Image (cartoon, helix red, strand yellow):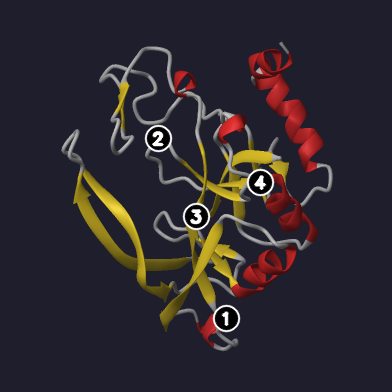
Amino acid sequence: MLCIFETRGFNPPEALIFQDGLVVEKCPACGRAIEVDSFKESRAWIGSQGAKWPDVCCSLGKLVLHERVIDILTGEGLTGFKAHPATIEQIKSKKLAAQPTPQYYIIEIQGGVDIDLEELDDDGGSICPICFYRNPRDDSPYRWSPKRLVPKLETWDGSDFVRLRNLRNARKFCSKRFIDLACQHRWTNFIFGESLPGVGLWEKPPKGGLSYLDPEWFEKLTERVKAKHPDLFQTASS
């Protein structure tokens, strides 16, 4: 099952900031400068806060995972990613510097899925046919964030990690298998959400939020999605 939720880590107190080389290309159709991921050189500077190494960390838009997470993903046979080792050059936190330094990996997402472009907004806009950059109307209430991202499951390639094929978007998405592993192994620092506004999963959720460490996260999440977006279920059952 594809769980179309953004997979990322959050910032301090356990923050790792990674930088890797970026290649900038110009789209021949719309002329927009497009950053292309490059994983040839990845290095990190560790902030002054933090007392333990998290399983996922903030990474300037990149998904960066601890070696223990990579070991489990590989052992469980999850698909749709390639792990690139990152070099940690500086550790400012005295507590972290006193501990063995783990290996972190920047994740290159290789799987893909299309989304329903009609669900992005209610008032038009366009998508570049070459680079798939979304260009909403200037007065659109969804100018900075789409209404919701709804996958077209018939286009999913079956990978556990996917990017959007028909919309340029920095978000990374995962299958239910990955969140189940995060629950089972009590992984720290993840956020899963929010592709559907108002629905998300946290390790330590805010008031009224849901935790992915709850073994019943999927059932509770399903009920919340049904309450907030009942039309999606009506479409699916019709």
Residue type pointed to by label 2: Leu
Q: Image quadrant for the C terminus?
A: top right
Say few, some or many: other residues with alpha carbon within 10 Å of mark 3 (under 14 / 14 to 19 / 20 or more).
Answer: many
The number of numbered badges drawn on the structure is 4
- Residue at 57 percent across and 81 percent down: it is 102
The reply to whether discs 1 and 2 touch (Cβ–Cβ < 8 Å) is: no
Task: Provide the secondary structure element on which disc 2 rests.
Answer: loop
The reply to whether discs 2 and 4 touch (Cβ–Cβ < 8 Å) is: no
Say few, some or many: other residues with alpha carbon within 10 Å of mark 4 (under 14 / 14 to 19 / 20 or more).
Answer: many
Q: Nearer the viewer, mark 1 or mark 2?
A: 2
Q: Is residue 83 above or below residue 119?
A: below
Q: Label 2 vs label 4: CA separation? A: 19 Å
Q: Label 3 vs label 4: CA separation? A: 13 Å
Q: N-terminal of the two: label 2 or label 4?
A: 2
Q: Is residue 135 visible?
A: yes
Give whichever of 204, 162 is nearer the camera: 162
Marking on residue 109: 3
Q: Is residue 197 above or below residue 175?
A: above
Determine which residue is flagged by label 4. 175
Task: Provide the secondary structure element on which disc 3 rests.
Answer: strand
Q: Position of residue 47 (x, y in %)?
A: 44, 72
Determine which residue is flagged by label 1. 102
Residue type pointed to by label 3: Ile
Q: Position of residue 86 (x, y in %)?
A: 45, 75
Q: Position of residue 135 (x, y in %)?
A: 29, 27
Q: N-terminal of the two: label 4 or label 1?
A: 1
Marking on residue 197: none
Marking on residue 167: 2
